[in-house]
Amino acid sequence: MKILLILGFIISYCFLFSQSTFVEGRGANGQGLWAENVAGISTLTTTSFGVSADYKFGLSELTNAQIRIAKPYQFGVLLLQWNSLGNTHYNVNEWALSLAKNLSPSFVMGLSLGYKREQIGYDNYGGLLADFGVQYQISHLLSASSVVYNPFRQYLEPSAFHLGLKYVASDKVNLAISMQKTESLPTALVAQLHYEPSSKIILFTSLSTQANNNAFGIAFLWHNLCIDTYLAYHYYLGFSPQMALTYNLE
């Protein structure tokens, strides 16, 4: 049912809205509508819309659907998002409002506030969540980023800290390395490669010392429309295919 909803949104909106690429948003250094670091949405210059579906480990019960809408204003870029995961027996819904602002030509700060509701059978649990991120342009080729997830340690989601560096090797290649620490889990080191062989194709790969951050993605660009496919791999749990549609409203 959730996949049908996603397809419905794709058919309804693919000629109306847009954004930059989905794979571009991966990691603490990412930018655009799908940036994991909330500061990364500051690069948006037009109203943007996106839908995605994540088929985790090939289990329909863990399919995650997401909708994001962002709009730039004079005071910064606002992002509204909704995530939904699970089925009638177990499901999680999250709503969040984010704001990112350029405080100087080289420094960006972002804040996200949201509400998360988890349902297990007839039991419901809810709580407020917050994320905080910054990005700093050290030089023309080098930038640094950091993001704190759930700093107030709301029990519905683990707290995490990511710190990253990105180097622009050429017009076609970006390299990034990040350190990720999630509560009691071991610290992970993640290396990422972003390659643009042509103006219509973008490739992305991620390799990690931990089991859950190894992935490959490819994006196809057509005018304002971008179609992304993304395949994550967990050593023990298997593959998680993901697909997103994004569009820039000019």
Image (tube, grey):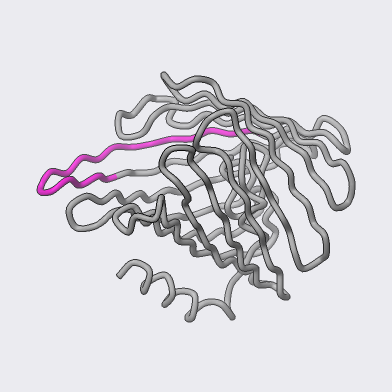
Dominant SS type (magenta): strand
Q: Residue 174 occupies which quadrant of the picture?
A: top right
Q: As drawn, is 85 to the left or to the right of 40?
A: left
**In this rendering, would 122 be left or right of 152?**
left
- Determine whether 229 is above or below 206 in the image: below
Closest to the observer, 70 or 59: 59
**In the image, 42: left or right of 91?**
right
Is residue 16 visible in the rendered image? The answer is yes
Q: Residue at x 61, y 45 (%)?
A: 26
Per the image, is 239 magenta? no
Position of residue 98 relative to residue 184, above or below, is below
Q: Quadrant of residue 159?
A: top left
From the viewer's perspective, tell me whether residue 20 is left or right of residue 91: right
Q: Position of residue 201 (x, y in %)?
A: 75, 64
User: Can the viewer see residue 76 in this picture?
Assistant: no
Q: Position of residue 172 (x, y in %)?
A: 85, 52
Rendered-image quadrant of the N terminus: bottom left
What segment carries the magenta color?
117-134
Q: Residue at the spot x=55%, y=38% of the render?
A: 213
Q: Quadrant of the C terminus?
A: bottom right
Please, which residue is most extreme toward the left here? 122
Percent x, y of residue 35: 60, 47
Q: Residue at x 77, y 34 (%)?
A: 143
- Residue 202, relative to residue 205: is it above or below? below
Residue at 65% x, 30% y: name it.
178
User: Looking at this view, is 226 or 213 the one in front?
Assistant: 213
Exactly how many numbered labels are in the figure? Answer: 0
- Residue 104, placed above or below residue 81: above
